[in-house]
Amino acid sequence: MGKAELGTALADENGKFKVSVPKQKHKNLLTVTATDAAGNVSEATIIDVLKKNEK
């Protein structure tokens, strides 16, 4: 299980953001967190990478 940071972004005034990450292999798990200006880190969300046509 890797700990590499794949991307970061800053949210706009409406809280919207977009992060681009390198293409991942099918069934990789990505962990996503958010950090506010005070340094508080959100609870982690796990994302399961699916094949292009899989839902």
Image: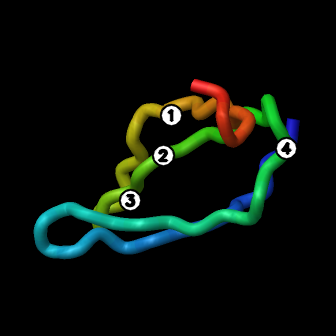
Q: Which residue is mark 1?
A: 44
* Residue 45 point in image, percent of width and height: 50, 32
- The answer for how far apart the CA atoms under marks 4 and 3 are is 31 Å
Q: Quadrant of the N terminus?
A: top right
Amino acid at dot 2: Thr
N-terminal of the pair, mark 2 or mark 1, is 2
Say which element carries label 3: loop
Q: Which residue is mark 4?
A: 25
Q: Are marks 2 and 1 in contact (CB under 8 Å)?
A: yes
Q: Nearer the viewer, mark 3 or mark 1?
A: 1
- The answer for how far apart the CA atoms under marks 3 and 2 are is 12 Å
Observer-nearest of 19 and 42? 19
* Residue 51 point in image, percent of width and height: 74, 36
Q: Which residue is mark 3?
A: 39
Residue sitting at 34 percent across and 66 percent down? Answer: 17
* Residue 6 point in image, percent of width and height: 70, 62
- The answer for how far apart the CA atoms under marks 2 and 4 are is 20 Å
